[in-house]
Amino acid sequence: MNLRPLYDVKERLEQAAIAGVGLLAEDFRLSRAAEQLKPLAGASPVFGKIDAGLTQLLSAPAGERSGLLLDVLALVDAVVYTQGQTGVEGELVPLPAGSGQYQELSYSQLSPLLTALTTTGGGRMELVKSAWEDHPEFFTDYRILPAVVDGLGDSYGEVSTLCANILKEMGPAVLPLLREGFDPAGKKEMAHRVEVIAAVEGAEATPWLREILTQAKGGVRTAVIFALGKDGANVPVLLELARTERGKSRDTVLLALSEQEGREVREFWAAELEQDTKSVYSLNHSHREWAGDLIAAGLQKRLEPFLSGEVRPTEEECTDISMWCQAIGQKNSPGMLDFWRWADEHMEALDRLTNQKGKSIFAGVTLTDTLRTCMRHTGPGPLRDYCLNLFDSHPAMTRYLSVSFPAALLSCPAAEVFEKYGPYILTEEPGQDTERKKTLNTVLLRALGDVWWYPQGEEYRVYGGQSAAEPLDIRWIERLTRAVCTDVPRRGGASPFAYYWEDVPEFDRTLMRLVNPEDGRCRELMAPYLRKRLDETGLPYHYSRWLIQLGSSPRGLFGKAMAKNPSANHLYVVWNLLHEASQVLPPEEVIALLEEFLEAKAGRKQVWAKFQEAIPWTVERLRAGEPFPEWDSWEKINK
């Protein structure tokens, strides 16, 4: 009996499992394989069952295909397994060292992973990632491990990176296979091999790296040089390479040298920056103290000639100053702190700097923003202490408030922070000195926009990842709900919620990032505020969702707000919002929201007939004590 059609069906079903059932209708290869299997259907009941399963799968609605696909694939796998036989003569010999281990795993268990590692197309990365998380033992199998190594050259960059990370976690056992067949003049796969070997072996990889360096080319050479930088003993080699390499290879040498220590390294960088100012790019991410001192001295040297205003920087000089500002990064060396003190002394002159066309280069603002960023990414120490007192020392410099406030959050008791800075949030129209008060209000609101409640750690964090010294004082929430000057500029980035068409004011986004939904007093303050904002703005999705997340309800305002823009109320987004409500609110509250929506006739016209059937049916289920229906139940109504 010719079983080739059976194997073809198995291959196409496995491909469908990876690519997704949404593409089944377009898979002519599966249809052809199913047709070629039909002659076998009359020869055996089991083949007849496979044929019937394929017919049902190919004609089934989209929502039922996933389960049918798994059923047919399981049956085909079982039949193929019974047809297996061994026909190789000779004695069993041990597997080559480092090529993986024999695991008591059937081919059907490993086949989806092996296919994902050895083919192309979408959906593969998630399959490999899930397999690694759920079954790491699969990757030690002699059938899988070589495929993971080959995956280092995958045309899809994220898959090759994932394979590299998996191999790093697997440790020394993968080294023999990585070194076997290594080609120092190869392409991406070989460069990734270098990366993995260096990560696994650390300093012990140095002799091998030096050995292959003379033969390495292209991306492999770049990877070897970068790996040499992980071992401080390679400084002499790197300094020599800095003299001989060109192009990308030399850029990699500079990156490697940016994390080294020693007198020779510092002397090299002093000479390098003097000779080629653009090399400062390679120091952007360096955390070495000498790098901070060099950047501080170099930037001050570039700014000083223009402080008097008699000479203006050229366009090239402005670009150079900008590069050196970027290179500050997260450096907080003693020399860097001295630079900040110098910049503070000359801030008025820095604010006045203009280019040769008379346009401001915003040197003062750029430096202040850079100082704030640097402080938020570095821990306790002299730099944070300096930032903490900066606004107190210069109260006229309102932008310094955005530096001192986060420093206070990171360092001081919560009550002290509120009592010092809370009054800058205006809760009534300012009297005298109106513009200054409004400016301070806006600066502080923007600074608060960089603070958020981090539920995973049950703490407040400041942008940059550092934790606040103490949880935010609840008086911030109380005061912000009474704020009168709420016009804060829009921050970059999308809404963290699903409904992007709603233009929610940035002030409310800022406020919601500060809310700890587990705090009873916080919920008590926020519920009436959010209901008021829902009524004022008529934007139902964000405000209703926020109320629901706090265990409250938009009831009484929901239907009216939804009816303001019926065209936005697609069947799915309404179901999604009310389904979320059902996970938090009592059934009677969800029923009230459903009926309110229906009474307001707030649904999109094109699907209103579905709403008219889905909502009463859902209400009936909820009253009967059943759970809120899943999405496919709403979707299928009126089909």
Image (cartoon, helix red, strand yellow):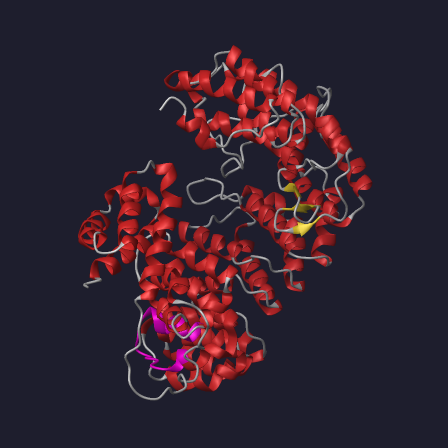
Residue drawn at x 33%, y 83% is 215
Horizontal and vertical percent position of residue 574: 49, 25
Image quarter where the C terminus lies is: top left
**Of residues 308 and 462, which is closer to you in this image?**
462
Q: Is residue 239 left or right of residue 46?
A: right
Residue 488 visible in the current orientation: no
Comparing 497 with 86, the one in front is: 86
Magenta includes 258?
no
Q: Is residue 106 left or right of residue 506?
A: left
Magenta span contains residue 192: yes
Which residue is at a point 63% across and 28% down the rendered structure image? 548
Residue 228, position in %: x, y? 47, 78
User: Does residue 591 appear in the picture of this structure?
Assistant: yes
Find residue 626 and report its horizontal and vertical position in percent.
Answer: 58, 28
Q: What count of labels does the image hold?
A: 0
Q: What stretch of residues is rendered in magenta?
A: 177-195
The relative height of residue 302 versus residue 559 in the rendered view (above or below) is: below
Residue 160 vs 9, above or below: the answer is below
Instruction: Using the rendered view, name the quadrant where residue 518 is placed.
Output: top right
Give the image quarter of residue 512: top right
**Residue 247 on image: x %, y %:** 34, 69
Q: Quadrant of residue 317?
A: bottom left
Q: Looking at the image, is 117 positioned above or below residue 94?
A: above
| Closer-to-camera residue (311/374) | 374
Residue displayed at 46% across by 72% down? 104
Say left or right for 42 vs 15: left
Residue 437 is left or right of residue 66, and the answer is right
